[in-house]
Image (cartoon, rainbow, N blue to C red):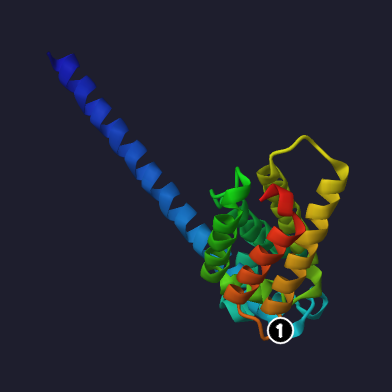
């Protein structure tokens, strides 16, 4: 009986230790995510102001984020890693967007959903896309759009059709880039309507 009671106490003590360890790890992870978000937000603001990562120093970023240099170097080796992390976060949000057109008649809905998504993340995209150092993001998004739209055409691979879709998407990406850089008076809704209209014109037999 004594051994059984001792065993129960041991189990309770072990559970308590595991719980405390788990809570510490959770708190640490939460603090880490919060610190990284502060770093990326400060980075995005500085990129928008100074137009290039070459004009930003770690000291500028730590001051803007209100953190120490030690905190910065705990998560990143340099500013290029911050830029890559920030781009990847935005790109992942786009890739995680669950709506993709599976049929030609779903393309309009796809563009509508994409417009809503861009509105929800407008501040992040506007900050990031105001730097010439982030044009790779446009390339990544364009490639994903091209894949989705070509899939919606539901036809065996055709090189000319693939090139047409890529050319079309490049035009849409350019319009969006101008929008986020305040270089056009078109709204996202107007770009959306124009895009749907041009898609139907460009691929009339397929939609």
**Residue at 26% in and 26% down:** 10
In the image: residue 119, left or right of residue 56: left
Q: Residue furthest front?
A: 205
When asked about the image quadrant of residue 195, the answer is bottom right
Residue 203 seen in the current view: yes
**Residue at 60% in and 66% down:** 71
User: In the depicted view, which residue is nearer to us: 29 or 123?
Assistant: 123
Determine whether 101 is above or below 2 in the image: below
Question: Please, what secondary structure does the residue beneath circle 1 have?
Answer: loop
- Number of labels in the image equals 1
Residue 79 seen in the current view: no
**Residue at 70% in and 44% down:** 153
**Residue 69 coordinates in the image, percent (x, y):** 65, 71
User: In the depicted view, which residue is nearer to us: 7 or 165?
Assistant: 165
**Residue 61 coordinates in the image, percent (x, y):** 66, 76
Q: Residue furthest left?
A: 1
**Residue 26 coordinates in the image, percent (x, y):** 42, 50
Q: Identify the residue under disc 1.
A: 184
Determine whether 11 is above or below 185 in the image: above
**Residue at 64% in and 63% down:** 196
Quadrant for the N terminus in the image: top left
In the image: residue 198, left or right of residue 189: right
């Amino acid at each position: 009986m004594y051994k059984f009671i001792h065993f129960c106490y041991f189990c309770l003590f072990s559970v308590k230790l595991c719980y405390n360890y788990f809570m510490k790890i959770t708190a640490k992870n939460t603090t880490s995510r919060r610190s990284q978000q502060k770093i990326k937000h400060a980075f995005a603001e500085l990129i928008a102001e100074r137009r290039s990562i070459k004009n930003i120093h770690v000291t500028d970023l730590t001051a803007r984020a209100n953190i120490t240099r030690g905190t910065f170097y705990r998560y990143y080796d340099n500013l290029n890693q911050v830029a890559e992390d920030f781009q990847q976060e935005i790109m992942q949000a786009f890739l995680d967007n669950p709506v993709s057109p599976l049929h030609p008649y779903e393309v309009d809905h796809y563009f509508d959903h994409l417009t809503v998504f861009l509105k929800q993340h407008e501040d992040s995209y506007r900050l990031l896309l105001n730097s010439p150092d982030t044009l790779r993001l446009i390339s990544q998004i364009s490639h994903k759009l091209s894949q989705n739209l070509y899939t919606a055409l539901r036809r065996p691979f055709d090189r000319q059709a693939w090139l047409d879709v890529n050319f079309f998407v490049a035009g849409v990406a350019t319009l969006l880039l101008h929008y986020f850089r305040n270089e056009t008076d078109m709204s996202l809704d107007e770009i959306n309507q124009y895009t749907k209209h041009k898609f139907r014109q460009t691929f009339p037999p397929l939609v």
